[in-house]
């Protein structure tokens, strides 16, 4: 058996650490979401659709805008430049760590003006029905304070991610999510039993968000008590007095190239944020508060899979690809050894992308086939009675088709953001403007055709499909330019005919059984009581059995090929 080269060994260790991080993050999301799911079921029965819509759509959009524009570009650039191994005796490595630490503190300073501008714009544009709710402006101020508090944790968060200390992040965010939900639930419970129910509804959500920010900062600080979270001047010998004053000031604190990459990614995040959160922008503009609450709960349930599985995978893809391919992006190979190292990294990365796409496509087929068949039954279990009459059922139906494209886009864009050059990012920004136009026109057209709030989900499907096309084409060209043969091809990632045929057959059997027994009408007539109906329980058992068969067939026909493709070698 041939011996493993140092490049292969390092890539394998990095991939294994990344996979371990994925498991930790999925575990975090699973446990925290299960706890919060139980509490949310009670929370949704206490909060009115109007208050929930304001908090979950408008205030959450406010938070995500401040946080995404302030930190996303810095986070992605730091994943590329953070040293993989810190040698305290190596002055260049120590300098690099100091530069990264200063850059990690930048989101807090970007966040201050971003928060002021965002709050001012939102206050000016908020409708009278929204602003007239009790304690609206005080709740808005608390959300702004929570955003600034969360940004103050960025130096510690980036240090944990740069060192791949995922367990620290798991503890911080897991504790924060649980504390946020508990705080919100208790505050709403107190409000519902007060003399004026509903008076403190928005304040309850604001206190929950503030509790999350405080918890995350507290856990991170307890793990890194000695970490400097304020920028400090670099050693004097690194200063370059011959440069212009601004460049000299930048060089005293940052690596100019890393800062430039951060600012490029930050500027691109403006368009990307609109495409990501465009549905909330539009639904807050044209839907009444009650329907905003219905849309929010539908998105909350529909995105459970995305938050539990897709988000951790996407984040760890960024970590793995940024570190594994940093040398192939930043510099040309000058020696045979460097060329061999880069080729090994590229081959392993192409295998990882192909494996990810293979799993995601198979999973997406199962979601569409079984999710669309059993959604009516699940709705009776999940949705409180006051939300059945809102837009929630239609939006959740659209999410069944949204989940597959969300999965594919996340993995592909994670790779792109990890290896794209500033020039590539500028080109993509221009394409993003075109994608934004497509999204807006699609949403308006579908809304006028009578799709209601679900038009936003279908417009996002169209938008993400165009982005998948762009990134997939770019990634294929990226590998073609660097390696003679790679593992990314349509035939290599699409499941075989056996699995595809079994999924199609399962869908046909389930649909025929539903039509013959009129189960949809039975569920609609009985509501929640249908969950105890013998025909409905038998229908659920039928789907469960067919699902197990499909998964088993995939493992037999595709799983072995997937494992053979990876060839992960670990000492």
Image: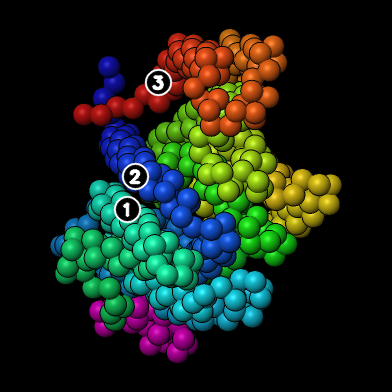
Residue corresponding to mark 1:
178
CA separation, marks 2 and 3?
34 Å
Label 3 residue SS:
helix
Question: In the drawing, does residue 503 fall left or right of residue 193?
Answer: right
Residue range highlighted in magenta: 234-257
Task: Say which of marks 2 and 3 sits in front.
Answer: 2
Q: By what rule are the colours in the image chosen?
A: rainbow
User: Reading the chain from its start, which is encountered first: label 3 or label 1?
Assistant: 1
Label 2 residue SS:
helix
Label 1 residue SS:
helix
Residue corresponding to mark 3:
563
Is any part of residue 16 visible from this angle?
yes
Residue corresponding to mark 2:
35
Q: Nearer the viewer, residue 463 or 86?
A: 463
Residue visible at 54% across and 38% down in the picture: 407
Which quadrant of the figure has residue 8? top left
- Whether the residues at callouts 2 and 3 have beta carbons within 8 Å, the answer is no
x, y percent for residue 314: 46, 44
User: Reading the chain from its start, which is encountered first: label 2 or label 1?
Assistant: 2
User: Reading the chain from its start, which is encountered first: label 2 or label 3?
Assistant: 2
Task: Say which of marks 3 and 1 sits in front.
Answer: 1
Is any part of residue 554 visible from this angle?
no
């Amino acid at each position: 058996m041939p011996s493993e080269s140092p490049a292969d060994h390092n890539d394998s260790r990095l991939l294994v650490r990344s996979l371990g991080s994925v498991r930790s993050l999925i575990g975090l999301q699973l446990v925290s979401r299960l706890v919060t799911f139980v509490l949310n079921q009670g929370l949704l029965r206490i909060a009115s659709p109007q208050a929930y819509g304001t908090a979950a759509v408008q205030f959450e959009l406010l938070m995500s805008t401040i946080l995404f524009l302030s930190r996303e570009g810095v986070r992605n650039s730091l994943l590329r430049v953070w040293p993989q191994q810190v040698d305290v005796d190596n002055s260049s490595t120590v300098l690099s760590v100091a530069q990264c630490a200063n850059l990690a503190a930048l989101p807090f300073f970007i966040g201050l003006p971003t928060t002021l501008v965002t709050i001012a714009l939102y206050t000016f544009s908020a409708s009278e029905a929204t602003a007239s709710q009790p304690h609206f402006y005080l709740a808005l101020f608390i959300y702004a304070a929570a955003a600034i508090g969360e940004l103050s944790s960025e130096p510690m968060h980036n240090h944990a991610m740069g060192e791949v200390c995922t367990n620290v992040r798991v503890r911080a965010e897991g504790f924060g999510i649980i504390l946020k939900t508990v705080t919100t639930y208790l505050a709403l419970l107190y409000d519902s039993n007060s003399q004026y129910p509903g008076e403190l509804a928005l304040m309850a959500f604001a206190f929950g968000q503030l509790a999350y920010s405080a918890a995350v900062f507290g856990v991170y600080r307890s793990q890194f008590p000695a970490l400097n979270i304020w920028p400090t001047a670099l050693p004097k010998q690194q200063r370059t007095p011959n440069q212009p004053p601004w460049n000299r000031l930048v060089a005293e604190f940052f690596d100019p190239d890393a800062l430039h990459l951060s600012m490029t990614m930050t500027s691109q995040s403006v368009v990307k944020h609109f495409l990501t959160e465009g549905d909330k922008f539009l639904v807050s503009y044209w839907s009444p508060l009650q329907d905003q609450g219905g849309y929010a709960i539908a998105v909350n349930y529909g995105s459970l899979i995305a938050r539990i599985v897709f988000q951790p995978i996407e984040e760890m893809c960024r970590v793995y690809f940024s570190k594994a391919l940093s040398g192939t992006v930043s510099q040309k190979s000058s020696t045979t050894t460097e060329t061999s190292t880069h080729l090994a990294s590229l081959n392993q990365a192409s295998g990882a992308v192909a494996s990810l796409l293979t799993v995601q496509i198979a999973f997406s087929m199962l979601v569409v086939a079984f999710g669309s068949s059993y959604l009516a039954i699940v709705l009776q279990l999940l949705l409180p009675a006051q939300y059945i009459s809102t837009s929630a059922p239609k939006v959740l139906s659209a999410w069944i088709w949204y989940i597959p494209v969300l999965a594919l886009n996340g993995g592909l864009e994670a790779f792109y953001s990890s290896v794209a050059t500033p020039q590539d990012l500028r080109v993509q920004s221009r394409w993003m403007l075109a994608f934004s136009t497509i999204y807006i026109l699609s949403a308006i057209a579908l809304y006028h055709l009578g799709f209601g709030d679900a038009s936003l989900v279908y417009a996002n499907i169209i938008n993400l499909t165009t982005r998948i096309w762009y990134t997939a084409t770019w990634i294929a060209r990226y590998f073609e330019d660097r390696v003679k043969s790679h593992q990314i091809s349509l035939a290599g990632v699409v499941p075989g005919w056996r699995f595809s045929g079994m999924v199609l057959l399962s869908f046909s059997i389930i649909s025929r059984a539903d039509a013959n027994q009129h189960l949809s009408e039975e569920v609609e007539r009985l509501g929640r009581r249908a969950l105890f109906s013998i025909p409905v329980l038998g229908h659920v058992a039928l789907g469960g059995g067919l699902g197990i068969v499909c998964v088993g067939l995939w493992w037999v026909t595709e799983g072995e090929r997937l494992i053979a493709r990876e060839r992960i070698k670990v000492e």
